Image: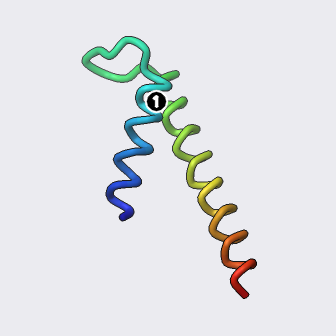
């Protein structure tokens, strides 16, 4: 499951952050992708904690 999620997040963040694909990422594109993935991980953690707390 994690591999599929990782690919999905990577694809979504890439599509959001890279408007003109080239041979390498610019600094701003790299930063954007990093922030995008960080936000996804944070949101997943919040969701998981909320789900876990309701199942107790």
- List x then y, in percent, for residue 15: 42, 26
Q: In the picture, residue 42 is in which quadrant?
A: bottom right
| Residue at 72% over, 69% down | 50
Residue 18 occupies which quadrant of the picture? top left
**52 displayed left or right of 16:** right
Furthest residue toward bottom? 56
Find residue 2 and report its image quarter: bottom left
Q: Is residue 39 left or right of residue 56?
A: left
Q: Is residue 33 left or right of residue 3?
A: right
**Residue position for label 1:** 30
Q: Residue furthest front?
A: 55
Q: How is the image coloured?
A: rainbow
Q: Is residue 54 left or right of residue 9?
A: right
- Residue at x 52% of width, y 44% of height: 37
SS class, disc 1: helix
From the viewer's perspective, is residue 48 above or below residue 14?
Answer: below
Residue 26 image offset from top left, x and y in percent = 42, 19
Which sits in the foreground, 53 or 42? 53
Q: Residue at x 69, y 83 (%)?
A: 55
**Quadrant where the image shows the N terminus:** bottom left
Residue found at x 43% / y 14%: 19
Q: Is residue 20 above or below residue 15?
A: above
* Quadrant position of the C terminus in the picture: bottom right
Question: Where residue 39 sits: x, y (%)?
Answer: 62, 45
């Amino acid at each position: 499951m994690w591999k599929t999620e990782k690919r999905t997040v990577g694809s979504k963040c890439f599509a959001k952050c890279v408007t003109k694909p080239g041979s390498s990422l610019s600094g701003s594109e790299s930063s954007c992708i990093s922030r995008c993935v960080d936000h996804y991980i944070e949101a997943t953690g919040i969701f998981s904690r909320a789900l876990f707390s309701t199942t107790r």
